[in-house]
């Protein structure tokens, strides 16, 4: 009989890893998390969507979220330079159950004063630490400051996670490895599964400001706590505005990588030049105080040829990253943890951790990421269409459902099919009223890689 | 619904909501797209208006400039869609 140190070895203690550990430890499996950083540490991806709520509830974390004092996120607003003074359109989460399953009410709904039409904006240092501690409280063993170097799969059914402590090489033998290493994509690199996205090649540069007036481009003070997406006149480029605390706001510029060449100094200038292209935004930010250095994120759109295999599963950013336009990173991380955990628990019952055991996870995630990818592609390809649908009484809720991150149950949501149809018409017919509004990104790469 | 009623309602909508009372001598033959009266965002509002007012949705393959050149041509499109529906 092989000796196992733990049932499950999880690489990475961010939301995907911590949520996986929480689900599994709660169900009685022994889990170990190896996190290379010491928490808390800053991280990009500060706005959630409501499909996170269900995971928080299932792992018993919702109350902590409600009490942590994170700004509540009731919706989103988009602004453009052609409508400088007020948002183009806004979407609040009202009208849908926050667990994203239309018409199904969870028991939390009965709690007095609990309104589930919101999610949260989070300081990722604090949020990730809370979630990791929660996994620990549920029984997971957590090592911080331990950087996993490699996983040895040579012994089938007994993967060994290898890392160094001090000068000594150490290894841990587990039944299954969960790679939650984020954009480091540890197993993706080691097993050569990673494929760079040929379409999205976005880049982000971001920081925090203290004292920025978030109602600067809102037409109603209640929107000040929304996430704002400010479109820039530069193609496929936009700015995020995310409340972090009462007084701190996260600001990030997202653009195509080609705009980003050059030195650090030039990037600093580029960041401000982008903001200056929306004068009111720039004036508001100049009046505030930048409290963190600019941080850059690049090369973040990729897919994997496989998201599971014999003795391993990939979750969160380690499995896939598209584009952060709809604040989906943490939600996808949490939901991939949720789907993976269900299969892992079943596999633990049978003792079979081969690839076939994770088929449901694979199918569900393929469906979800495909829907997301298409939605985002349409968004960039024909933005006016998104505007049209968000304002349309018949489709508004369907689009909201997608915006909430509810993308996993349907093979192809009707509303996506219709949007794709319109994009096709606009592409093929020069006389189409929106032909001249087609963006640079083409809508032909609609295939997931796994 | 009569075609003339549709034309009247479209004309009132464009005059009030798009032109906001600006007098350009709008009538059913005014070239809406050519004169830049209907921008892409206004097109969205117009489609919503048509959907609400006449209870017809313009299908994707009819979102062609030639159907939206004038109030008259939009009215023809609406009438056609009303027939298609019934």
Image (tube, coloured by chain):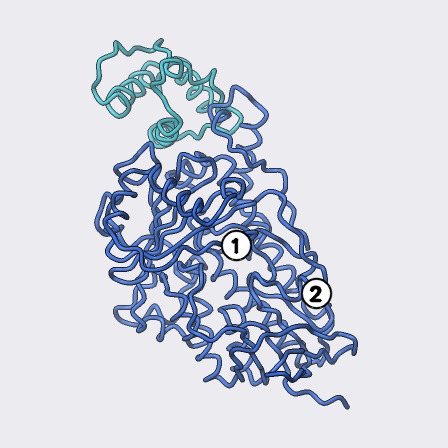
Chain colours: A blue, B cyan
Q: Which mark is residue A109?
A: none
Q: Residue at x 33, y 51 (%)?
A: A92
Q: Nearer the viewer, residue A296 or A434?
A: A296
Residue A175 at x, y percent in the picture? 69, 80
Would you call the spot at circle 2 few (<14 residues within 10 Å), some (14-19), or many (20 or more)? few
Q: Nearer the viewer, mark 1 or mark 2?
A: 2
Asked where in the image residue A83 lies, by quadrant, the reply is top left
Marks 1 and 2, how far apart at CA: 30 Å
A67 versus A266 height, above or below:
below
Quarter holding the N terminus of chain A is bottom right
**Number of dots carrying numbers:** 2
Residue bearing the label numbered 1: A407
B9 versus A180 height, above or below:
above
Image-based side of B13 in relation to A312, left or right:
left
Residue A50 at x, y percent in the picture? 41, 60
SS at circle 1: loop
Image-based side of A222 in relation to B35, left or right:
left
Would you call the spot at circle 1 few (<14 residues within 10 Å), some (14-19), or many (20 or more)? many
Residue A75 at x, y percent in the picture? 34, 52
Q: Nearer the viewer, residue A206 or A304?
A: A206
Q: Chain of mark 1?
A: A
Quarter holding the C terminus of chain A is bottom right
Q: Nearer the viewer, residue A156 or B50?
A: A156
Q: Earlier in the sequence, mark 1 or mark 2?
A: 2
Q: Nearer the viewer, residue A258 or A345?
A: A258
Q: Residue at x 38, y 58 (%)?
A: A293
Residue A210 at x, y percent in the picture? 27, 58
Q: Chain of mark 2?
A: A
Image-based side of A88 in relation to A422, left or right:
left
SS at circle 2: helix
Residue bearing the label numbered 2: A190
């Amino acid at each position: 009989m092989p000796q196992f140190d733990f049932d499950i070895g999880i690489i990475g203690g961010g939301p995907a890893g911590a949520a996986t550990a929480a689900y599994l430890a709660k169900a009685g499996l022994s889990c170990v998390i190896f996190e290379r950083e010491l928490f808390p540490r800053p991280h990009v991806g500060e706005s959630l969507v409501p499909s996170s709520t269900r995971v928080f509830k299932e792992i018993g974390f919702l109350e902590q979220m409600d009490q942590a004092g994170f700004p509540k996120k009731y919706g989103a607003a988009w602004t453009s330079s052609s409508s400088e003074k007020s948002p183009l359109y806004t979407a609040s989460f009202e009208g849908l159950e926050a667990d994203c399953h239309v018409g199904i009410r969870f028991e939390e709904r009965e709690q007095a004063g609990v309104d589930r039409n919101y999610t949260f904006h989070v300081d990722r240092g604090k949020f990730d630490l809370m979630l990791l501690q929660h996994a620990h409280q549920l029984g997971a063993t957590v090592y911080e400051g331990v950087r996993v170097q490699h996983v040895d799969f040579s012994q089938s059914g007994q993967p060994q996670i290898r890392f160094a402590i001090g000068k000594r090489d150490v290894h841990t033998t587990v039944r299954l490895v969960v790679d939650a290493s984020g954009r480091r994509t540890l197993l993706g690199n080691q097993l050569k599964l990673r494929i760079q996205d040929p379409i999205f090649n976005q880049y982000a540069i971001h920081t925090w400001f203290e004292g920025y007036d978030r109602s600067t481009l809102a037409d109603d003070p209640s929107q000040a706590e929304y996430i704002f997406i400010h479109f820039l006149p530069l193609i496929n480029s936009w700015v995020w505005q995310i409340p972090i605390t009462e007084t701190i706001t996260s600001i990030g510029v997202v653009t195509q990588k080609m705009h980003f060449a050059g030195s650090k100094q030039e990037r600093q200038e580029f960041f401000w030049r982008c903001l200056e292209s929306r004068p009111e935004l720039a004036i508001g930010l100049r009046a505030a105080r930048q409290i963190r250095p600019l941080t850059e994120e690049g090369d973040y759109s990729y897919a994997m040829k496989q998201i599971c295999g014999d003795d391993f599963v990939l979750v969160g950013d380690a499995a896939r990253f598209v584009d952060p336009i709809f604040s989906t990173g943490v939600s996808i991380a949490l939901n991939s943890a949720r789907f993976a955990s269900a299969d892992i628990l079943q596999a633990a019952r049978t003792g079979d951790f081969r690839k076939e055991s994770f088929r449901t996870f694979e199918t569900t995630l393929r469906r979800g990421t495909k829907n997301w990818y298409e939605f985002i592609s349409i968004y960039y390809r024909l933005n006016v269409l998104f505007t049209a649908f968000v304002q349309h009484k018949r489709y508004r809720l369907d689009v909201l459902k997608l915006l909430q991150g509810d993308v996993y149950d349907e093979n192809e949501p009707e509303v996506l099919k219709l949007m794709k149809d319109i994009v096709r018409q606009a592409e093929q017919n020069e006389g189409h009223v929106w032909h001249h509004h087609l963006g640079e990104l083409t809508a032909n790469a609609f295939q997931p890689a796994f | 619904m009569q075609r003339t009623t549709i034309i009247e309602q479209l004309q009132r909508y464009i005059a009030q909501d798009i032109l906001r009372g600006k007098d350009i001598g709008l009538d059913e033959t005014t070239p809406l797209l050519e004169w830049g009266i209907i921008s892409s965002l206004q097109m969205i509002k117009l489609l919503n208006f048509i959907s609400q007012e006449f209870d017809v949705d313009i299908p994707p393959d009819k979102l062609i400039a030639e159907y939206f050149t004038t109030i008259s041509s939009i009215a023809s499109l609406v009438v056609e869609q009303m027939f298609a529906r019934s």
